[in-house]
Structure formats: C-alpha cells, structure tokens
Image (cartoon, rainbow, N blue to C red):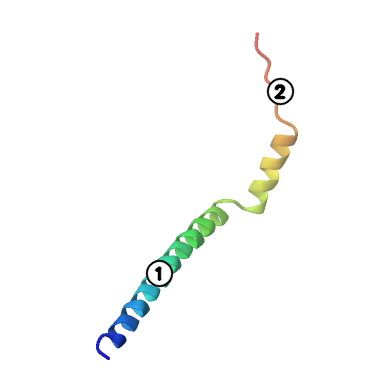
Amino acid sequence: MEGGEASSDTSDDSESASMQAISQAWQSVKRAADDVLEKNSLQDLLEKRNYLQNPMAMYYI
C-alpha cells in the first residue's frame, strides 16, 4: 500500500493549516476587542449615553 500514509499526512497538514488560519483569525478578533475595551471605560460609555439622551441644543442666527 504505497501512498496511504502520505495522504493522511497531507490531510493532517491541511487540517493543521486550517486550524492555524482559524486560530489566527480569532486572535485578530481578540486583539480588536481588547483594543476597543481598552479605549472605552464605563465612564466613557455613560458620558456618551448621557450626551445622546440630552444633546446640547445648537442655536443658529
């Protein structure tokens, strides 16, 4: 049986490469989420909410 083991190695390599690609994608998602969370405190969110609920009136002459 020639080639039987080589094809399973190729399959394992493909699965490993797929898992590595998926892992890298999730790492990118985690970095992006961490970046957003680091830049926005609860205080920032409260201030944004308050501003959006009661925007300052602008008067033009």
Residue at the (70%, 36%) spot, across then down: 51
Above-or-below relation of 33 to 10: above
Mark 2 lies on residue: 57
Q: Decide: few, some or many residues near mark 1? Use Cα within 10 Å; few <14, some 14-19, many ≥20.
A: few
Residue 27, percent from left and from top: 46, 65
CA gap, disc 2 and disc 1: 54 Å
Residue 14, percent from left and from top: 36, 73
Q: Quadrant of residue 13?
A: bottom left
Quick one: quadrant of the N terminus? bottom left
Above-or-below relation of 21 to 10: above
Q: Residue furthest front?
A: 1
Query: Position of 50 compared to 14: left or right?
Result: right
User: Can you tell which mark lies on residue 54?
Assistant: none
- Amino acid under disc 1: Ser
SS type, badge 2 = loop
Residue at the (59%, 51%) spot, across then down: 40
Residue 2, percent from left and from top: 24, 88
* Nearer to us: label 2 or label 1: 1
Asked if disc 2 and disc 1 are in contact, CB closer than 8 Å, the reply is no
Residue 15, percent from left and from top: 40, 74
First reached walking from the N terminus: tag 2 or tag 1: 1
Residue 36 versus residue 17: which sits nearer the camera? Answer: 17
Residue at the (44%, 62%) spot, across then down: 25
Above-or-below relation of 60 to 6: above
User: Can you tell which mark lies on residue 18?
Assistant: 1
Quick one: quadrant of the C terminus? top right
